[in-house]
Image (spheres, rainbow, N blue to C red):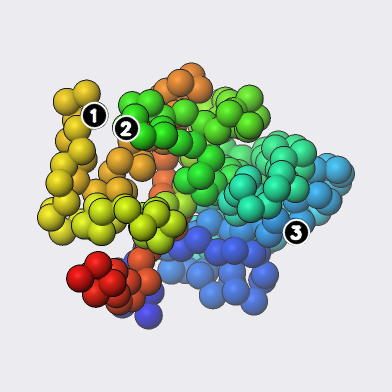
């Protein structure tokens, strides 16, 4: 189904063999996942990371799975988690990348941390005012520098409809790509949708963190089916 729809990149949320093995020989780029619930064991003990790396290497034989990235956790710094993963995520990232390097595959397979877009913000000042959240800024700078030094990508999950859902005054059209939104001007740059504005906010945040050229991947994005119709009805 994925190939029929010309989808050639897949992000998985775990590394179970029974799932991963089916991508062998497809040529599809695969990002394996490590759930947030496992971050503690990989942050505390490098040996656990060394053992886990077999979930990668056993799929790399000739004609095997085209594994490109390992997602260490998923949106671990969400505000709703109340800081529960702040001490374990970065150490887990370092141990997983160290294990990949030791296995001789670290030059081709990079570890990263998919983040929710709530790790950065610009208030009401526009994307150019973007910066990482003050409560995690030092940690995010350390992570970004590590990602930069390892030539890994920064992965972000962006859901524009969440802004629409959380703010009754948010303009409906700005959450979509139809071009019907009134442009927002930020120092000469015009924005007609939330996605572009959000992504540029990240770019400014990365620049201020000293890593303007880090590769960026949008790991997740989406809108519920019928969401726009529902919003238009609610707003007359």
Instruction: Assess whether mark 1 and mark 2 are in contact (beta carbons under 8 angstroms).
Output: yes
In percent of width and height, residue 224 lies at: 37, 71
Q: Nearer the viewer, residue 179 or 236?
A: 236
Is 147 above or below relative to 79? above
Q: Earlier in the sequence, mark 1 or mark 3?
A: 3
Q: Earlier in the sequence, mark 2 or mark 3?
A: 3
Q: Nearer the viewer, residue 231 or 97?
A: 231
In percent of width and height, residue 23 lies at: 51, 70
Q: Which residue is mark 1?
A: 186
Task: Indicate the secondary structure of the residue bearing disc 1.
Answer: strand
In percent of width and height, residue 153 lies at: 48, 39
In the drawing, does residue 231 fall left or right of residue 72? left
Task: Indicate the secondary structure of the residue bearing disc 2.
Answer: loop
Instruction: Assess whether mark 3 and mark 1 are in contact (beta carbons under 8 angstroms).
Output: no
Q: Which residue is mark 2?
A: 126
Q: Which residue is mark 3?
A: 37
Which quadrant, please, contains the C terminus?
Answer: bottom left
Residue displayed at 64% across by 76% down: 18
Q: Mark 2 and mark 1: span between their CA atoms?
A: 6 Å
Q: Give the number of the disc on residue 209.
A: none
Which residue is outermost to the bottom?
1
In the drawing, does residue 162 fall left or right of residue 35? left
Q: Nearer the viewer, residue 108 or 70?
A: 70
Is 172 above or below relative to 136? below
Around disc 3, counting alpha carbons within 10 Å, would you say few (fewer than 14), some (14 to 19), or many (20 or more)? few
Residue displayed at 53% across by 56% down: 31
Q: Nearer the viewer, residue 34 or 151?
A: 34
Residue displayed at 65% across by 64% down: 15
Around disc 1, counting alpha carbons within 10 Å, would you say few (fewer than 14), some (14 to 19), or many (20 or more)? some
Task: Indicate the secondary structure of the residue bearing disc 3.
Answer: helix
């Amino acid at each position: 189904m994925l190939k029929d729809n010309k989808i050639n990149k897949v992000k998985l949320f775990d590394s179970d063999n029974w799932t991963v093995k089916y991508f062998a020989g497809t040529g599809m780029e695969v990002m394996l996942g490590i759930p947030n619930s496992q971050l503690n064991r990989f942050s505390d003990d490098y040996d656990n990371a060394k053992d886990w790396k077999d979930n990668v290497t056993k799929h790399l034989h000739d004609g095997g799975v085209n594994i490109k990235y390992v997602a260490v956790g998923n949106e671990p710094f969400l505000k709703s988690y109340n800081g529960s993963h702040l001490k374990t995520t970065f150490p887990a990232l370092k141990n997983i990348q160290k294990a990949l390097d030791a296995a001789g595959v670290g030059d081709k397979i990079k570890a990263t941390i998919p983040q929710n877009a709530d790790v950065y913000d610009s208030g009401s000042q526009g994307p150019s005012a973007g910066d990482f959240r003050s409560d995690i800024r030092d940690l995010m700078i350390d992570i970004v520098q590590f990602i930069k030094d390892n030539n890994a990508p920064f992965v972000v999950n962006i859901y524009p409809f969440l802004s629409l859902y959380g703010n009754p005054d948010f303009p409906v059209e700005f959450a979509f790509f139809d071009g019907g939104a009134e442009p927002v001007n930020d120092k000469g740059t015009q924005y007609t949708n939330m996605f572009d504005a959000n992504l540029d906010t990240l770019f400014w945040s990365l620049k201020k963190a000293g890593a303007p050229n880090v590769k960026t991947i949008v790991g997740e994005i989406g809108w519920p089916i019928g969401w726009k119709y529902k919003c238009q009805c609610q707003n007359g």
